[in-house]
Image (spheres, rainbow, N blue to C red):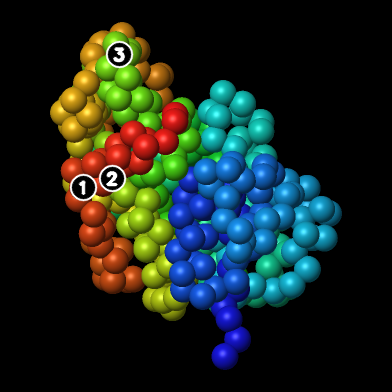
């Protein structure tokens, strides 16, 4: 029986690494396309790594010469300050990928979306909320929404097997050290003072292994096609409580609350309804936040950050 093949766009990143590792365990052939080579901590010898900027359509077409059973788009620039680069890497990159795969249609095409696509809206956010570009203050959220709308239109017009997974805050081992949870872990492990906001925001955190399982289930389930599905824990955490939990497990750290001002587009409550994930792809998170934090802290204790 022929092995299934998967193309992971952004396969050298945090979620991409974990998805590649899980795909290899399933016996799939794994190819990664990314602008950057994998960091040593996220290198997998059995993955076929291709360096390519997905906004360069000509180069991308040369890089993708064969069809794939599954395609997952995790690519894109996440620095909110560079508006032009963020919009181009997400929206144009997504369009370029989809146009190539319209000629060699996969079994499933997953566009990884974001909770920020909902803009200013009441939580818990449900997938049937009408998203409005004007209510989205971050360029990242706008770029993600434009990409989601594009692939959903392809499903409606071309029967393209696309799914959008709106991912909330993924965390876990091997995440970049400039992300929220690794920053807090570092401060607590080193038993230092570190600046924080007032910590009153409500956010939803999902362990990377749970997020990857949702992606796998979406790839292999026909019910996911043409759907937008939230992926999160469904159990919001106050940021201050998250910091205090990490502090307790790490037995150190001196968070300085109120030293950071919230960003202009900061949303105070951001967490999803995850009922649709259960009904459409039979997915629900398995790893509790406390268990996930302990394993993540253990990893950063054992590795230099």
Name the spot of residue 180 as percent of width and height, x first. 37, 30
Splitting the image into 4 quarters, where does residue 252 fall? top left
The residue closer to the viewer here, 203 or 300, is 300
Helix, strand or loop status at disc 1? helix
Give the labeled residue for mark 2: 295
Q: Do callouts 2 and 1 mark residues in contact (Cβ within 8 Å)?
A: yes
> Which disc, if any, is residue 192?
3
Neighbor class of circle 2 (other Cα within 10 Å; few <14, some 14-19, many 20+) is: few
Neighbor class of circle 3 (other Cα within 10 Å; few <14, some 14-19, many 20+) is: few
Splitting the image into 4 quarters, where does residue 109 fall? bottom right
Residue 77 visible in the picture: yes
Query: Vertically, is 85 above or below 57?
Result: above
Placement of the C terminus among the 4 image quadrants: top left
Placement of the N terminus among the 4 image quadrants: bottom right
Name the spot of residue 297 as percent of width and height, x first. 30, 37
| Residue at point 19%, 32% (across, down) | 249
Name the spot of residue 245 as percent of width and height, x first. 18, 31
Query: Vertically, is 199 above or below 229?
Result: above
Neighbor class of circle 1 (other Cα within 10 Å; few <14, some 14-19, many 20+) is: few
| Residue at point 43%, 67% (across, down) | 216
Give the labeled residue for mark 1: 291
């Amino acid at each position: 029986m022929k092995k299934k093949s998967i193309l992971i766009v952004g396969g050298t990143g945090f979620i991409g690494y974990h998805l590649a590792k899980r795909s290899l365990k399933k016996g799939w052939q794994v190819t990664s396309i990314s602008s950057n080579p994998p960091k040593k901590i996220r290198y997998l010898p059995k993955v076929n790594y291709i360096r390519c900027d997905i906004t360069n359509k000509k180069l991308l077409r040369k890089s993708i010469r064969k069809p794939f059973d599954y395609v997952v788009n995790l690519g894109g620039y996440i620095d909110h300050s560079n508006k032009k680069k963020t919009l181009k890497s997400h929206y144009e990159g997504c369009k370029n990928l989809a146009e190539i795969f319209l000629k060699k249609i996969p079994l499933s095409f997953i566009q990884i979306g974001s909770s920020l696509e909902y803009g200013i809206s009441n939580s818990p956010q449900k997938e049937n909320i009408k998203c409005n570009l004007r209510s989205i203050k971050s360029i990242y959220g706008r770029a993600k929404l434009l990409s989601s709308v594009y692939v959903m239109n392809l499903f409606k017009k071309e029967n393209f097997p696309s799914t959008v997974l709106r991912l909330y805050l993924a965390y876990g081992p091997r995440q970049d050290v400039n992300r929220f949870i690794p920053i807090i872990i570092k401060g607590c492990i080193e038993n230092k003072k570190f600046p924080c906001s007032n910590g009153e925001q409500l956010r939803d955190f999902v362990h990377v292994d749970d997020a990857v399982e949702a992606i796998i289930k979406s790839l292999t389930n026909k019910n996911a096609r043409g759907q937008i599905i939230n992926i999160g824990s469904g159990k919001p955490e106050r940021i201050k409580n998250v910091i205090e939990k990490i502090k307790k497990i790490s037995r150190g750290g001196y968070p300085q609350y109120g030293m950071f001002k919230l960003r202009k587009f900061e949303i105070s409550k951001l967490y999803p309804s995850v009922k649709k994930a259960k009904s459409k792809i039979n997915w629900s998170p398995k790893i509790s936040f406390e268990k996930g934090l302990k394993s993540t802290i253990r990893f950063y204790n054992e590795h230099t950050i």
